Image (cartoon, rainbow, N blue to C red):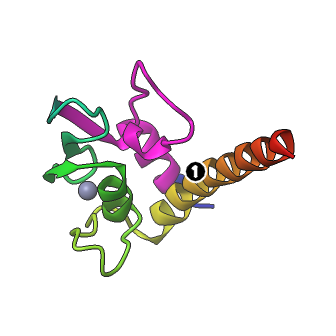
Amino acid sequence: MADLAVQMLNDVRVIPPNDDPMWPLWRYVNKIVKIGGHGRNARMICRLCDLDFSGSYSRVRAHLLKVSNSGMKPCPKVCIDVLILLKDEQDKADAMLVDDLEVLDNEAA
Ligand SMILES: [Zn+2]
């Protein structure tokens, strides 16, 4: 198993006070300053590679999950084992989102 990858993520993960399981990758960046009043835009530093960037959760996701053609530099510290773990966390969050939408749909029907 990818014990080293698990260990690496355990070492850098910080659960924020306003942690939301829908946005699990926030746990791997250090949010510095909020830009504007909309809450989702922030300046942040990747806890894995110390890259300093700003933007929204989609940028965090693009960086950590190495989304191609996102305009975001992929995280050099995310090896394939780490990527699998991070993707798994995001997939679980996405699945919750789908569940929520289905509940809403059912209630609306
Ligand atoms: Zn990084």
Q: Amino acid at mark 1?
A: Glu
Q: Quadrant of the N terminus?
A: bottom right
Name the residue rendered at 29%, 49% in the picture: 56
Q: Position of residue 83 (x, y in %)?
A: 47, 64
**Mark 1 — residue?**
89
Pick out the residue farthest to the top: 17
Name the residue rendered at 55%, 65% in the picture: 84
Q: Is residue 64 above or below residue 89?
A: below
Name the residue rendered at 14%, 51% in the picture: 53
Q: Is residue 20 above or below residue 98?
A: above
Q: Position of residue 79 (x, y in %)?
A: 39, 68
Nearest the viewer among 5 and 39 is: 39
Q: Is residue 28 above or below residue 2?
A: above
- Provide the residue span drawn in magenta: 4-32
Q: Is residue 35 left or right of residue 92?
A: left
Nearest the viewer among 102 and 33 is: 102
Q: Is residue 28 above or below residue 63?
A: above
Q: Position of residue 62 (x, y in %)?
A: 35, 64
Pick out the residue farthest to the front: 109
Q: Quadrant of residue 107?
A: top right
Secondary structure of the residue carrying tag 1 is: helix
